[in-house]
Every structure is written in C-alpha cells, then in structure tokens.
Image (cartoon, helix red, strand yellow):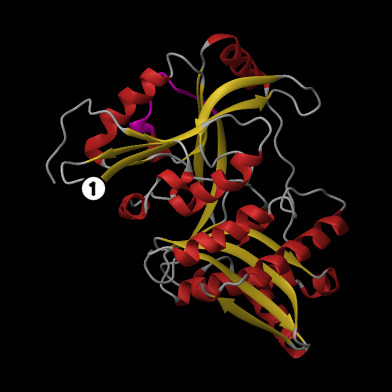
Amino acid sequence: MTAPTPGDRPEIHRTPSALDGATVDGWRRLVAADPHGSWFATPEWVLSWWETLGAAGPSNGPAEVAVWRGPGGGVEAVVPLLHTRLRLHPRLPFTARCLTLLGTGPGAADHCGPAVAAHRREDVRDWLTARARRATLWLPDLDPAAAGSLPAAARPVARSACPRADLTDGHDALGSRQFRSTVRRYRRKLESAGVAFRWVPPAEVRPEHLDAVLALHRLRRAALGRPTTFDEHRRPLHLRLLERSAAATAPDGQGPAFCLAEHGGRTVGALYGFRWNGSFAYYQIGWDQAWAPLRLGTVLISETVRACAEQGLHTFDFLRGTEPYKYRFGAVDHHDDTRLLPRGPSGALLALKHRVKTARPKEIPAD
C-alpha cells in the first residue's frame, strides 16, 4: 500500500446511513487486522450504539465518523466522535461539554479507541489535536495501544482493571487445582439435577436469547438488592447489535454469542458476550437464584470458558472490574486508561473532578 501524503484530511460522515457497505466493511477489516482491535471498536458496536443510545441520549449532540482513505480508496483510519455533556456528580444537575468517542459511556464498552493503520497515526493525531483546540477531549476506557493515535497532551486521569484469562493451555489449566475440583463437583450436581449447558454461536443467536439474559440478570440483581443498567432500556442497543452482526460480512463465528443453562425446556442461566479476533469478551450474566446453592453462576462461566478454549480462542476477557471470582479462573489484570485534554471551563471542571475522585466501584460476586 502506498503511504498517503502526511496531513491528508478525512471525509466526515454525520449519519449512520451515510456510511456505505464498502466503508463499513473496510472499517471492520481495519479493526480485525489490529492485534489489539476490540469488538467495541467495530462498526457493529459503534453504529448500533449511535442508532440507539446515541440518538436517544438527552445529553448527546451531533456525532461524526471521520474516515481516511488510501490512494485506492481503501479505509485506513476511522475516528468516531460524539459531542456530549458529562454529568459531574450523580446527584447534582451540573454537566460539562466535551467531545468523546462515539460508542463509549452508557453501554459499558471497554478497550476503546479509533481504528488506525500504523502509517496513519500521525494524521489522526494531528487532526484530533486540531479538534481539541475548540473542545475538551474526553476519551474513556482506551486500550493502551490507542495512545499512539492521540494528542500527546491528552493525559491519563483514570485507570480500570480488565482481567483476562489466557486460554492457550486449555480450560483445565485455569485456576487452582482445588477450584477446578470444586467446579467439577458442582457441574456434576447440576447435570444430575437435569441442567444442561449449550453454546449458541453467533450464527445461531436470536432475540429470545437476549431476552433470556436480560430477564435472568434482572432477577439476580433484584435478589442481591442492587440496581442495574442492563435492562429494557438497553435492549434496543443489543437488539440492533444482533441485527447488524447477522447482516455483516464478518468472518464466520464472529459477533454476539451466548452460553445457556437449560432445565426442563426452560433457560435457567444465560451468559452473553462477544467473540472477536480470537477473544471472547464476557459482557453480562444472569441465572435463576433457585440454583445458586449449586453455584450455577460459577459453573456457567466455566462452561463458557471451556467452549471458548475448545474453539481455539486464545483469550477470555472478563472486561472491567476486579471481582474476586475472575481471578479464581486465572485471570490477570490488563488495564484501560481514560484520557482528558481539557479546554475552557468545562475542561477545568472535568480536570477538577478527576483529581478528587478516589472511590472504587463495589465488587459483585459471581455467586
């Protein structure tokens, strides 16, 4: 590929429909070619988010997708941006205006960042630096590899742990011997009680699988006495994600997938995540609390890990959060960064907020 002239300007798309199929396919291939490319950087996630949460968010302003092309018209970089207002405190109405990555924030995306070929990083960095002269840049939950395409002045203000388990040596190599023995014992008890586990690959995913995990997750959280944002208000995002993924020309086996626990023809447990680029990102889970004494949640995660290892995936990504159960599966911390390049009063307020923010999120056990 011939390197473009440095400083080439991108084309700007301001509606999802403005991106034709060839551009979307090129964007997807660009993410897939990056060893750090995350599902949350794909057009399936970003455009589904734009069409649902982005359009419905009362604090959101206009969005745009900047696309750089090579001499032959191929997609070489994609930067999706959104004008929005960030709430400065959950109990106060004050907000700060900023420019952020489209697809981040509500919906809980991790390992975010623009999709950029190596030879385009300088062009993207210069373009973002110019944009940041007029607006505060707020770039949350970035994969560290994204830093090379960002303005040098964008400084880290927060860091989140995203544990991952290495599947290279197979499911039976994960965790301690005692933990593996405990999981096997409860799996036998569940199977004796008539519970069967089933992997649903991306090609077979249906809306009813999404509805099952939504309902079971809601019941689990209610039993714990804790709220959740993964509810009916999020359903349009994930339904659109299933629709876009089914229509995509992505390689076989990529996209949303589920692992189900079934008893007597009824789904009693469901785990939802995304298979992409040799990795599975574990997104949400739910199960019937009647099965909690038999550790259905832990066994369901274990069966999902087993299915991923048997398919030859190399990584089971637990995404953000340091809940202890993740480390029992042998997960090791990787980290995402949040970066801020403040401008004007809004930027000053965001900088102040993150200097004083010290609270950690509460941990939620698997069982």
**Residue 60 lies in the magenta stretch:** no
Q: Quadrant of the C terminus?
A: bottom right
Seen in the picture, residue 91 relative to 284 is either above or below; the reply is above
The answer to which of 109 and 196 lies nearer the viewer is 109
Disc 1 element: loop
- Quarter of the image for residue 188 reads bottom right
Image position, residue 183 (x, y; %): 67, 74
The answer to which of 231 and 68 lies nearer the viewer is 68
Instruction: Say whether residue 218 is visible.
Output: yes
Residue at far left of view: 2
Residue that badge 1 annotates: 74
Instruction: Say whether residue 151 is visible.
Output: no
- Residue placed at 33% from the left, 24% from the top? 127
- Residue placed at 52% from the left, 74% from the top? 201
The answer to which of 260 and 127 lies nearer the viewer is 127
Image position, residue 112 (x, y; %): 47, 42
Residue at far top of view: 344
The span picked out in magenta is 147-157
The 10 Å Cα crowd at callout 1, few under 14, some 14 to 19, many 20 or more, is: some
Residue type highlighted by circle 1: Gly
**Residue 154 lies in the magenta stretch:** yes
- Residue placed at 68% from the left, 24% from the top? 357
Image position, residue 113 (x, y; %): 43, 39
Q: How many marks?
A: 1
The answer to which of 117 and 165 lies nearer the viewer is 117
